């Protein structure tokens, strides 16, 4: 299994269990998330409570919650939304921190396409949710999520060059 970690923080943000599609000249990965039920499951052990003197309505009060699989799996932490100025400021700061960590060929790809990728994200800024990794580091890699028209499950966007793949 491959796990993708943020270059700057080491937070695990994605794995090969979640297929991705490259968009924006390969600079952004698009990953489909799913709402899933997390918690107790109902197990039928074949007993007949009425025949054994038990009540038919006997049940355990289990807490069952719906979570988004990617958020839950990688313990992503939702962050407040950005306005346009805040987002541009974040991206400029993040680019300065990230560039020295990239290999030369990835630096060229990043320089060539980051402006277009940033414009793409800005065009949907009001629809985005923002997440960071488990460390909640201020300079950490941001993960973006939005709902495609008509979809009940979120789609996640990752800046691909900021991830390093690690075999587990």
Image (cartoon, grey):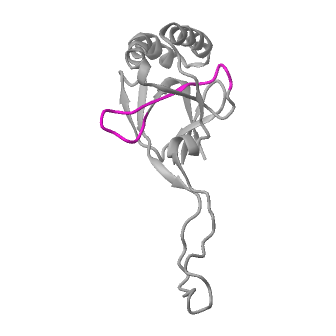
Residue in the picture at 65% in, 19% down: 139
Residue 80: where, in percent of width, then height?
A: 58, 23
| Nearest to the observer: residue 76 or residue 24 | 76
Residue 73: where, in percent of width, then height?
A: 57, 45
Residue 7: where, in percent of width, then height?
A: 61, 26
Q: Residue furthest left?
A: 150
Dominant SS type (magenta): loop
Residue in the picture at 50% in, 15% down: 107
Residue in the picture at 49% in, 19% down: 106
Where is residue 50, by image quadrant? bottom right
| Nearest to the observer: residue 83 or residue 103 | 83
- The image shows residue 34, relative to residue 90, as above or below, that is below
| Nearest to the observer: residue 23 or residue 130 | 130
Is 78 left or right of 125, judged from the image as shown? Answer: right
- The image shows residue 167, relative to residue 45, as above or below, that is above
Residue in the picture at 67% in, 20% down: 138
Where is residue 30, by image quadrant? top left
Q: Is residue 141 a member of the stretch shown in magenta?
A: yes
| Nearest to the observer: residue 72 or residue 2 | 72
In the rendered structure, which segment of residues is drawn in magenta? 137-155
How many numbered circles are shown?
Answer: 0
- The image shows residue 62, relative to residue 125, as above or below, that is below
Is 84 left or right of 100, judged from the image as shown? Answer: left
Q: Is residue 55 a member of the stretch shown in magenta?
A: no
- The image shows residue 123, relative to residue 160, as above or below, that is above
Where is residue 103, by image quadrant? top right
Residue 15: where, in percent of width, then height?
A: 52, 42
């Amino acid at each position: 299994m491959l796990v993708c970690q943020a270059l700057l923080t080491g937070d695990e943000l994605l794995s090969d269990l979640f297929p991705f599609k490259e968009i924006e000249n390969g600079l952004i990965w698009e990953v489909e998330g799913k709402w899933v039920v997390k918690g107790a499951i109902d197990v039928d052990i074949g007993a007949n409570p009425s025949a054994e003197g038990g009540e038919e309505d006997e049940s355990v009060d289990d807490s069952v919650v719906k979570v988004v699989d990617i958020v839950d799996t990688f313990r992503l932490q939702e962050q407040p939304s950005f306005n346009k100025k805040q987002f541009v400021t974040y991206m400029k700061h993040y680019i300065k921190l990230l560039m020295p960590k990239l290999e030369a060929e990835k630096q060229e790809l990043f320089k060539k396409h980051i402006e277009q990728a940033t414009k793409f994200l800005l065009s949907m800024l009001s629809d985005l949710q923002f997440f960071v990794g488990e460390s909640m580091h201020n300079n950490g890699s941001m993960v973006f999520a939005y709902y495609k028209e008509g979809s009940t499950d979120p789609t996640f966007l990752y800046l691909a060059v900021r991830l390093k793949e690690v075999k587990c």
